Each structure stands twice: as structure tokens, then as C-alpha cells.
Image (cartoon, rainbow, N blue to C red):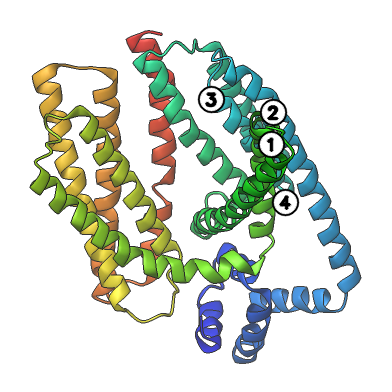
């Protein structure tokens, strides 16, 4: 964002503390530079005066800030180590095929949520509620027999959505009801994915080099290495990546807006080619069960790209071809969802009710409502009837619905359809 645009955005966001905090954490140097222009324009603003006192205190007390940074890094390292240990212990159960693979996610999620609660100074009440819900999920998933039944598999597939919503509540802390805080969490997801992907590529290179070196001396350490190093290392780095993104390391933050712009037209083109290929090849989601599943996976991935592009959209940036590409992508995703919805309704009427069909039906309806909402608001945005804020609200305010649907499937399906 240009300095002049950022200055105006600061002035326009005075009534939303979460947005101001997100802007500051996103790029402290740029924020402070534009802030000086903002306070010159409105020197009597109480909000800006408070921020001025904060920024002045930070600039004159560098040693305490440095110490705090070291403390946060040590705390993040502790949580990352906890994630690695829990994940390694859970791996024993998962490899025995006696417990759900969700246990691997729980180890990482527990450590990451703990770090978020610490980093955002969440209230004791909120921390207790979130950690209590996490403990209840852990207890439930391990009491549920891991027997391969459809309802049990669906529970395992939907509980990660609930865990993700809990992570969002921990990330936003005491501001979890505010749109700006939820928007910051969505941005965190995109930036975290970018940074973790970079770390993963480095890890793959290191793994290849290590295995090759040991093979040269006649030692095959592949099983040991993947079981003990790769698994625990991935868990450790997940928390470290969360720490780095939360503390404004610039790599992912500088890349995210550009990746968001590039991805929208690329995914639009990919989805168009995919749908045309479906027609040419003759695949039918109304008949082919496996293809219908792939259809919905593609839809979920497209929805994630749409939300990512919206969260990285700058407030003061003029409408561009990338926005029209995003609008076309949303429209095409909505058409894809309607096709999948008609297909699953057809399969329900033709072949009867099963937990898989009911779960897919519910997921398609949930996504359909969200896409329709985003499409309508995006249309108003392109016509200059609404700003980007209302568009970002459409992306963020619906998030609890996904968690609610995931919870419904995870809890009710095993009880209704049997486990």
C-alpha cells in the first residue's frame, strides 16, 4: 500500500482498533511513517494520540522490546518442542492403526493454540473455554472407535475444521468478535502456508541430502529418519512458522499480496480447463461417486483461494483486472457448487440416504450460501457501491458456520448412523 493510501486508511480505521493493530503488525515501519502524516491531519484525535504515545514509548525503549522479542522466541521454541514431543508420541498410536490420525494434528494444534493464547494475552475465561474444547475433542476422538465406518471417517474429516475455528479464536484472543481480528487470522493462514511451504522445501532438500550421505556409507536410515526426524521436525516448524508470521517476519507478508493476485486468474483458468475437460472426457458427477468427491475437493480448494485473495486485497487499491478475475472465479465456483449440489440430490433420490451423501449435501449448502453472499457483495464492490471492508466482512463473518457444520457432523453422525 502506498504511504498516502496507508495514511488515509489509518484515518478511516480509527473506530476499529483491531484493524489498526493488524496494520501495525503487518509492517511496523510503514505504519509509523504514515502515522506521522495521519496525526498531523487530526492532532486532536484521542485514538491517534494514544497510538502516538505507544509508538513514542516503543521508539525510546528499545532494550525492553528486544528482551520481549527474545522471550517470545523462547516461549515459541518451548511450544514448538511440545508439539514435536506430542506428535512423536501420537505417531506410535497412529502407526498401530488403533487411534485416529487426528491425534497428530491435535499435538500441533495444542501447541499452536497455546502460543496464540500467550502471544495475544487472551483472558483466562477465553483460554479455559478454548483449551477445554480442545481437551473434549481429544477425549472424544480417542473414545470413538477407529473402525473404518463411514460415520467415523466423516467425524475424523470434520473435526480438523472445528480445531481450525478454535485456533482462530485463540489467534484473535479477546477481539474474536471483531471483523478486523478475524481478517488478520485469515491473512495469517495464507502467510503461514507460504512460509511453511518454503520451510518444507528446505526440509525436503535436507532429507534428500541426508539419506544420500548415509547411503554412501552403507546405512539405510530412511525409516528412522522419517519416523523421528521428519515427523517431529514438521510439527516443530509449524509452531515456529506461526511465531514468525505472528511477529511480522517480512518474507511471507511481502509475498502474500502478489501470490493472491497471481493465484486468482491462474485458478480461474485451471477451473475452466478442468470443467471443459470434464465435458470432453465424459465424466458425470451424477453417476460417478469418486468423481463427485474430487469435484467437491476442487470446490473447497477454490473457495480457499477466493478467501485468500479477498483478505490480501488492499483497502485503497483501485479496481483492477485481478478483481474481475476474482469475481469470475467466484461466479464459476458458485456454478460448480450448484452442479455438485444437484448431483448429490440426484444420488440421494436415486440411491438413498447415507452418511457420506448427507455430509456432502450439507457441505455444499454451507459453501453455496457463502459463495452467494461473497458474489453479491463483490458485485457491489466492483460497481463502487461498497468498499473492500464489507467484502472482507463477508469472508470473515461466515467462518463460525464452517466450524458449526463440522461439529454437527463429527458429533451427530456417529450417533445417528452408528459407530
If you read the primary sequence from the N terminus, does the residue marked by circle 1 or circle 3 appear first? Answer: 3
Mark sitting earlier along the chain (1/2): 2
Which label sits in the foreground, 1 or 3?
1
Q: CA distance from mark 1 to mark 4?
A: 23 Å
Element at label 2: helix
Residue that mark 2 sits on = 88
| Residue with the mark numbered 3 | 101
Asked whether the viewer can see residue 48, the reply is yes
Label annotation for residue 119 = 4
Q: Earlier in the sequence, mark 2 or mark 3?
A: 2
Which corner quadrant of the image does residue 254 belong to? bottom right
Asked if labels 2 and 1 touch by Cβ distance under 8 angstroms, the answer is yes
Give the residue pinned by disc 1. Answer: 232
Name the residue at the right extreme. 63
In screen coordinates, is 318 left or right of 357?
right
Distance from the alpha carbon under mark 2 to that under mark 3:
12 Å
The 10 Å Cα crowd at callout 4, few under 14, some 14 to 19, many 20 or more, is some
Q: In the image, 384: left or right of 64? A: left
Element assignment for label 3: loop
Residue 378: percent from left, percent from top: 28, 65
User: In the depicted view, which residue is nearer to us: 253 or 177?
Assistant: 253
Amino acid at each position: 500500500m502506498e504511504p498516502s493510501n496507508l495514511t488515509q486508511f489509518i484515518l478511516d480505521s480509527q473506530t476499529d482498533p483491531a484493524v489498526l493493530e493488524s496494520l501495525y503488525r503487518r509492517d511496523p515501519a510503514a505504519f509509523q511513517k504514515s502515522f506521522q502524516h495521519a496525526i498531523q491531519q487530526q492532532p486532536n484525535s484521542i485514538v491517534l494520540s494514544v497510538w502516538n504515545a505507544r509508538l513514542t514509548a516503543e521508539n525510546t525503549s528499545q532494550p525492553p522490546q528486544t528482551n520481549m522479542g527474545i522471550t517470545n522466541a523462547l516461549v515459541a521454541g518451548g511450544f514448538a518442542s511440545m508439539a514435536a514431543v506430542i506428535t512423536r508420541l501420537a505417531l506410535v498410536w497412529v502407526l498401530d492403526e488403533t487411534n485416529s490420525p487426528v491425534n497428530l494434528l491435535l499435538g500441533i494444534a495444542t501447541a499452536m493454540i497455546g502460543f496464540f493464547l500467550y502471544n495475544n494475552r487472551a483472558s483466562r475465561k477465553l483460554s479455559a473455554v478454548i483449551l477445554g474444547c480442545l481437551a473434549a475433542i481429544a477425549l472424544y476422538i480417542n473414545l470413538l472407535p477407529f473402525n473404518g465406518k463411514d460415520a467415523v471417517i466423516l467425524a475424523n474429516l470434520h473435526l480438523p475444521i472445528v480445531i481450525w475455528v478454535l485456533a482462530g479464536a485463540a489467534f484473535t484472543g479477546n477481539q474474536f468478535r471483531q471483523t478486523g481480528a478475524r481478517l488478520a487470522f485469515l491473512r495469517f493462514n495464507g502467510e503461514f502456508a507460504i512460509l511453511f511451504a518454503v520451510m518444507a522445501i528446505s526440509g525436503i532438500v535436507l532429507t534428500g541430502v541426508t539419506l544420500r550421505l548415509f547411503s554412501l556409507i552403507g546405512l539405510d536410515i530412511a525409516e528412522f529418519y522419517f519416523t523421528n526426524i521428519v515427523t517431529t521436525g514438521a510439527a516443530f516448524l509449524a509452531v515456529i512458522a506461526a511465531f514468525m508470521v505472528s511477529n511480522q517476519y517480512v518474507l511471507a507478508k511481502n509475498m502474500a499480496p502478489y501470490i493472491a493476485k497471481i493465484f486468482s486468474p491462474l485458478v480461474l483458468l485451471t477451473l475452466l480447463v478442468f470443467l471443459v475437460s470434464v465435458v470432453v472426457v465424459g465424466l458425470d458427477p451424477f453417476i460417478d461417486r469418486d468423481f463427485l468427491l474430487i469435484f467437491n475437493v476442487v470446490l473447497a480448494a477454490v473457495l480457499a483461494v477466493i478467501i485468500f485473495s479477498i483478505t490480501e486485497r488492499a483497502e485503497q487499491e483501485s479496481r483492477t483486472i485481478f478483481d474481475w478475475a476474482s469475481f469470475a472465479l467466484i461466479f464459476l465456483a458458485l456454478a460448480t457448487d450448484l452442479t455438485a449440489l444437484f448431483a448429490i440430490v440426484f444420488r440421494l433420490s436415486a440411491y438413498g440416504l447415507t452418511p457420506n451423501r448427507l455430509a456432502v449435501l450439507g457441505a455444499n449448502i454451507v459453501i453455496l450460501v457463502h459463495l452467494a453472499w461473497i458474489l453479491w457483495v463483490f458485485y457491489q464492490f466492483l460497481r463502487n457501491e461498497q468498499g473492500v471492508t464489507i467484502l472482507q466482512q463477508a469472508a470473515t463473518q461466515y467462518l463460525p458456520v464452517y466450524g458449526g457444520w463440522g461439529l454437527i457432523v463429527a458429533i451427530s453422525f456417529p450417533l445417528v448412523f452408528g459407530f
